[in-house]
Amino acid sequence: MLATRSIKTDAKVAAIDLAIRMIDLTTLEGADTPGKVRALCAKALHPDPGAPDAPRPAAICVYGDLVAEAKAALGDFGVHVAAVATAFPSGRASLDVKLADVAYAVAAGADEIDMVIDRGAFLAGRYRAVFDEIVAVKAACARSAAAGGGSAHLKVILETGELSTYDNVRRASWLAMLAGADFIKTSTGKVSVNATLPVTLVMLQAVRDFREATGRQVGVKPAGGIRTTKDAMKYLVLVNETVGTDWLDPDWFRLGASSLLNDLLMQRQKLATGRYSGPDYVTVD
Amino acid sequence: MGNPFEYAPAPESRAIVDIAPAYGLFIDGKFADAADGGRLKTVNPATEEVLAEIAIGGEADVDRAVKAARKAFKSWSALPGAERAKYLFRIARLIQEHGRELAVLESIDNGKPIRESRDVDIPLVAAHFFHYAGWADKLGHAGFGPDPKPIGVAGQVIPWNFPLLMLAWKVAPALAGGNTVVLKPAETTPLTALRFAEICVEAGLPDGVLNIVTGAGETGRALIAHPDVDKVAFTGSTAVGKEIARTIAGTRKRVTLELGGKAANIVYDDAAIDSAVDGIVEGIFFNGGQVCCAGSRLLVQESVADELLASLTRRIKTLRVGDPLDKNTDVGAINSAAQLSRIRELVTAGEAEGAERWSLAGELPGKGFWFPPTVFTGVTQAHRIARDEIFGPVLTVQTFRTPAEAVEKANNTAYGLSAGVWTEKGAKALWTAQRLRAGVVWTNTFNKFDPSSPFGGFKESGFGREGGRHGLEAYLDV
């Protein structure tokens, strides 16, 4: 029954701006360079040079070695830096290496850590190992007192495309939340099946039930394959109708995406000017 | 700026349909007024606007229609099956081509949400014609002997809840088998049947093979009592079904009856709760519960009852009741004032008998026939709302402790059309399904229909099967 809901005109402007503010603008390529990251950061700070009122995305998402570059480029404008870690995307490394990966990114100033769970352990039924690893990573997210203390926000990537069943998605969601995840995230974007609406629905139901049971609210981040404004609207409707307005905020719902931002901006321009925009009227960075 | 999550209306355009001010009867390939000129009005149940005047067929009209069908039977039944199939395939394709128009027309006349008429009713109508078109030249392989013969003239009376779909269930197998048809649509929802008649003309169906005689109860009685009708098929209330059975007792007429229901939807403690909640919603609020196989009795294992009911209430609060043509609408209008008053009467009885009522809050449209999604808890088998078919968006909730108790309560009804079972254990699902006295048992789903799957009832839900190979049997001399 979901997803047949219409959002139009003024309300659509509000929904588009909300979706933009929920984006983790992402570049996760082997070919990423400091220059590429600086360009992406500039895009985050000035999403639409022709429309200074266009909101900024929530965060930039990069590999850990580029955190310092991103941090420097973003300054104090409130756009976070998220780093993927724990031998992203496969998660196939020793725990020591994974923790070092996390510690490096946190030390470099990452505000958020996007870790991957050990799908091999999960699929082999070694849930305890998965749980313990998340607990250890959560501990490694702590910042030194010199860096201001506190802790980087931990997003736990379940890689739902590899877990394959809804039962597994639900189980992995609970495992991650019990182990201390601040967010649960669908995918790395590096496997053939990434975020889908049904999988996101299961995860939303899990965070809703988890809050009812424990009182603690956990965020949700679908990532990978969300490219159009229409896709983003479907996700927002799903959030609204499953968990309600408490989650309709960048603190509690994110969209991991790279090309989505420009589609949202084109729709935004169309609504502002009444004319269809085109790819040459949004900046590619 | 507006709040995006109040959602904007997205109404389907009415411009696609062209409703005439008045319709005649479709007999022998032509539209003509009723002999005595009688008329009734069909209204849009969402607005009470009069849509059109419809001819009331009397005995003389029914006789003319049956004669036309008898005359056409000779050549239609003599056609090779492959030739009959061509007409049926053509009709199926035309239904698809006119799909949007038929969906809008159905929603206007019946009150059901456009999402249902567009995504469920009309696609299933086309699917039924495609399915039976495929059977027309394979009747010798259907398991009823090498060369089964048609029965003759079929008199068919259909209800208002799925007007065109019920027509398809009846007309497609009848024509595939080589029979000819006189069909009486329900008096509150005749428009899609009349549009279907035009589609048959467009498809070149020979005159007299399909005749449509509109009217109310008297017209239906005349059709069923007509001496030259060989086969009677009826979908509707159990009371009328009993009357039909009495009428044809002692005649040569064959009959299939698809009547009421009071389906149990059993949720075990190991069910996936969120899936079950969606299935319960689908089971009782699809078409506003005006479904003979609606999952109107929720039987939930006591150990998960509180959790399930909390989830169910939360889910129902996201339902949107209103304009049937709005694509955002989940629950549309009640089909008629008469049906609405029946729902109200039973709901009042439920309250008086001490069950606890919860209804979805929110304003209903001022005009038209509306009833909010409603759940009764604290219901027992003794309550009228647990025994009588309400035929509206009203769910009764009872609890059970053991599988045996669930089955006993589920079967403790005069009906036996459908049932649902929700459990993650396959063995338990099968154990339960084997013991349920119901024609259809859905496991971990509800209201799933397919033209290849037979549908029909036990006990007072009727007899005979419609759909699939089994559905052919009623239209073949076997």
Image: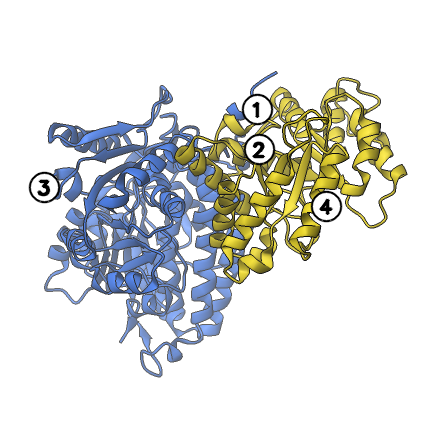
Chain colours: A yellow, B blue
Query: Mark 3, chain letter?
Result: B
Q: Which residue is mark 2?
A: A236
Marks 4/3 in contact by CB < 8 Å: the verdict is no
Q: Which residue is mark 1?
A: B4
What is the three-letter code of the residue carrying label 4? Asp
Query: Mark 2, chain letter?
Result: A
Q: Secondary structure at mark 4?
A: helix
A164, above or below B379, in the image: below
**CA gap, disc 4 to disc 3?**
66 Å
Counting residues from the start of the chain, the first of labels 1 and 3 encountered is 1
Q: Which residue is mark 4?
A: A101
Residue drawn at 35 percent across, 21 percent down: B367
A89, above or below B453, in the image: above
- Comparing labels 4 and 1, the label whose residue is closer to the camera: 4
What is the three-letter code of the residue carrying label 3? Ala
Label 3 Cα neighbours within 10 Å, binned few <14 / some 14-19 / many ≥20: few
**CA gap, disc 4 to disc 2?**
33 Å
Q: Where's the C terminus of chain A, which quadrant?
A: top right
- Comparing labels 4 and 3, the label whose residue is closer to the camera: 4
Tag 4 and tag 1 share a subunit:
no
Q: Secondary structure at mark 2?
A: helix
Q: Which residue is mark 3?
A: B382
Give residue B327's position: percent from left, percent from top. Answer: 50, 34
Q: Is residue A69 left or right of residue A98?
A: right
Give residue A109's position: percent from left, percent from top. Answer: 75, 32
Which residue is the extreme one toward the right? A35
**CA gap, disc 2 to disc 1?**
9 Å
